[in-house]
Structures are given as structure tokens and as C-alpha cells.
Image (cartoon, rainbow, N blue to C red):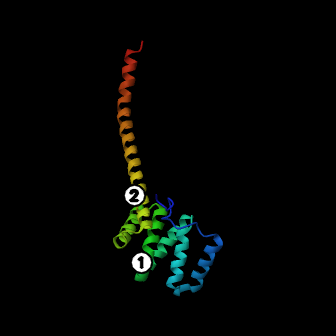
Amino acid sequence: MNSMAKEDYLPGNPLSDAELKVLRDQYEQEGEYVSLQVRFNYAWGLIKSNRVSDQQEGVKLLTQVFKDAPQRRRECLYYLSVGSFKLGDYTNARKYCDILLEYEPDNRQVTQLRQAIEDKLNKGKYLLGALLFQANIIQRVSWAWPLSVALLLSVWP
């Protein structure tokens, strides 16, 4: 039996507004020379948020931390994957997970996140296929509709 909850691959509850404000204040106080740790902490808090604009900003900051700090790349990749997943950017989320899994193939948290991403992608493919099928049926019916009406009218007394 799997001991991890269904969504253990996602970071815990979002920070409260007050907690996020502490991280934001630290980030803003350091100004132009903000430290790597403060940038990472603030990005982490933003990714955990339920607000899309915060998540987008978190992904942007983490991308910069990833470029600037090779020693933080593993953590950045994980949270970039989580942020991308939460934003619905499943292609990038999968890419980040795949890179992590190359180095940590037994990482259950990343493996679960990767599976959740695949589930979302497959659901999207299924829905797209169903929509295309329905559109095809509608197109065929709409083409035949005038003929059916004409046929009915021709035999109607």
C-alpha cells in the first residue's frame, strides 16, 4: 500500500499572507543584491501560493536561481516542475521531472509528480480526441441534415 497521500508530490499548504509578506519583505529589503537563499525562499513561497500571478513570479525567480546557482539546481528543478504543473504547463513540468529522474530515478516524490503530469496530459489528449470525434459527427450530420429535411418534405402530404 502506498504510504504517501495522493498529492504528496505537491508542497504543503500555501503560506499565509503574513508569512508570504515576510519573505517578500526580505526579498525587497535586499534590493539589487538579493542573496540566493532569499530569492529561493521567496520563489518557494510564491510557488506554494494558490494565486496564479504568484506562481508565475515564483517560476520566473526559480528560473533565475537555476541559472545562477548550480548547487541549487536539484531543488530548483523540483519546484519549477511543481510550479509549471500548478500553472498547467505540463510540457515543461514533465521536462523538469525527467531531468531530475535521470539523477534520482528512485525519488518517489518526483515519480508521483511525473505520473500526475502524465495523467493530466493523457486526460487532455482524451478530451481533445473526444472533441474532434464529436466535431466530425456534427460535421457529417450537418451536411446530411438539409438532405434529410428535403427528403421528409418530399414525402410529407
- Residue 73: assigned label: 1
- Counting every numbered tag in the picture gives 2
> Local crowd at mark 2 within 10 Å, few (<14), some, or many (≥20)?
some
SS for dot 2: helix
Where residue 56 sits in the image (x, y, percent)? 50, 68
SS for dot 1: helix
In the rendered image, the residue lying farthest to the bottom is 33
Where residue 100 sits in the image (x, y, percent)? 38, 71
Compared to residue 38, the image places residue 112 above or below, namely above
Tell which of 144 and 35 is nearer to you. 35
Tell which of 46 and 140 is nearer to you. 46
Circle 2 residue: 118
Q: Which amino acid type is shown beneath numbered disc 2?
A: Glu
In the rendered image, the residue lying farthest to the front is 1
Q: Residue at x 43, y 62 (%)?
A: 112
Q: Residue at x 60, y 70 (%)?
A: 15
102 vs 112, left or right, is left
In the rendered image, the residue lying farthest to the right is 18
Where residue 136 sits in the image (x, y, percent)? 35, 39
> Local crowd at mark 1 within 10 Å, few (<14), some, or many (≥20)?
some
Q: Which amino acid type is shown beneath numbered disc 1?
A: Arg
Check contact, mark 1 vs mark 2: CB within 8 A. no
Q: Which of the 4 image quarters holds residue 119?
A: bottom left
Query: Disc 1 or 2, which lies upstream in sequence?
Result: 1
Compared to residue 61, the image places residue 111 above or below, namely above
Q: Residue at x 36, y 21 (%)?
A: 151
- Residue 39: assigned label: none
Where residue 115 sits in the image (x, y, percent)? 41, 59
Q: Quadrant of the C terminus?
A: top left
C-alpha separation, residue under disc 1 versus residue under disc 2: 23 Å
Compared to residue 26, the image places residue 156 above or below, namely above
Q: Which of the 4 image quarters holds residue 48?
A: bottom right
